[in-house]
Structures are given as structure tokens and as C-alpha cells.
Amino acid sequence: MEPFVLTTDRLELRPFAPDDTDEVFRTVQDPDILRWTTIPSPYTYKDAVHFVEQISGEGLRTGTGFHFAVRPRGGGPLLAAVGVGVHLTPGVWELGFWTAAPHRRRGYVAEAATAVIRWTFATLPLDRLIWRAEVGNEPSRLAARKLGFTMEGVQRAGTLHQGTARDSWVGSLLPSDLALPGLHPYLPARDVAATDAVAGARTAPASDVSAAL
């Protein structure tokens, strides 16, 4: 896919490019970004090059990941990063974000991520957009809630961070949450139960089901 730009009232979002490398390297030296995101630590200039040219560049070329540098409209410093990448499960994509330390608590991530989410659901074939953060990352969870994600619980060993598997909070946003069609029709569990009740179907106890597997 060719590079493109998303805009909001205050912000301009475009895929990371080689010109962003120096700023990426400086920005992610922030202790909070290193602590809570799954990036190498210490973070070297070579890591910044890899992110910009391989992770972001290759993702854009193959259509498997879209990582946006967030800047003020009309130009200015790197404020944040917001990205979506295809998950291992077909039809599932994952949202991630961070904010540069000097620009936090100004609503930039919420504004930028809202634009990315709208673009994602309008453009990509998916049933489910997920968000994950290591347990304890309260600012990320608060941002995800504001974006409309439903918290689903704790995923044990859900994040590999600095060589250690750690528990993650996980949340989801579905096309139906935004009154949009998904890749496949969605039948919530409550509707399955109602359908079974109307049909007079009997479901096996969980113990019987697991024993048969």
C-alpha cells in the first residue's frame, strides 16, 4: 500500500518514514515507554532503524501493519505513535500506542487512535480489534476504555517483555460496537442461548464436552 495521511482537528498521522528515525530513537528513551512497551531495552539507534524501515515500512508494503507518526497539523514534533497490526488469528488486529513524555495528558492518543480505529474498521477485513497491556499499565487501560474497548480480563503470560512472560489486560472493540458489519456475522453468547432455548436444544454439561475432546 502507498503511504497516506490521516487527519483530525489537531493532528496529522502518516506512516513512519526514514526521516522519523532520529526522533523515534530519542523519544523512546523515556523510561515509561521502555517499561511498558514490548520494545528492546536498552533501545539502540539500530532498533529505531529496524522499527521505521522493517516493522513500519514492511507492514505498509505488505498490508500487515500500519504504524503512524502523530504530529500537529501543519508540522511539528513527534507527539505519539499509534499502530494496528494483524494478529495470528484471522480477522483479528491489534491496536498499540505510546505518547512522547512532553506531550502527555493532552488527549493526543485518544484523538489519533480514534482516527486510526475508524480507518481500520472502514478499510481492513476484521471481526475484532484487540488492545493489550501489561497488568499495571493503568494509563493505557484508561485510554483503551475511553476509546470504547470492552475489558475482557487478564491473559496469563500474555505479553513477552524483556525475556519474561507477563500477565496482560486484554480488551476488544468489535465492528458491531460501531454499528458496522464485520468480516463474519457475529452471534453473541446470549443470542446463542436464546436460539437454543427456542429450538429446544439441549447442551451437554461442560464436563461432558471436555471429556469428549
Image (cartoon, grey):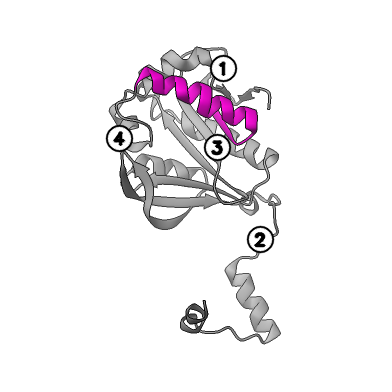
Q: Which residue is mark 3?
A: 84
Q: Which mark is residue 35?
A: 4
Residue 69 makes an appearance in the image = no
Give percent across and percent down for residue 71.
51, 19
- Viewer-nearest of labels 1 and 2? 2
Q: Earlier in the sequence, mark 1 or mark 2?
A: 1
User: Could you say whether the residue bearing mark 3 is in a helix, strand or loop?
Assistant: strand
* Residue at left offset 32%, top offset 23%: 29
How far, Cα to Cα, is label 1 from label 4?
29 Å
Q: Which residues are magenta?
A: 44-69
- Viewer-nearest of labels 4 and 2? 4
Question: How many residues crowd around disc 3 within 10 Å: few (fewer than 14), some, or many (20 or more)?
Answer: many
Q: Do callouts 1 and 4 mark residues in contact (Cβ within 8 Å)?
A: no
Q: Do callouts 3 and 1 mark residues in contact (Cβ within 8 Å)?
A: no
Q: In which quarter of the view is residue 156 placed?
A: bottom left
* Residue at left offset 67%, top offset 41%: 124
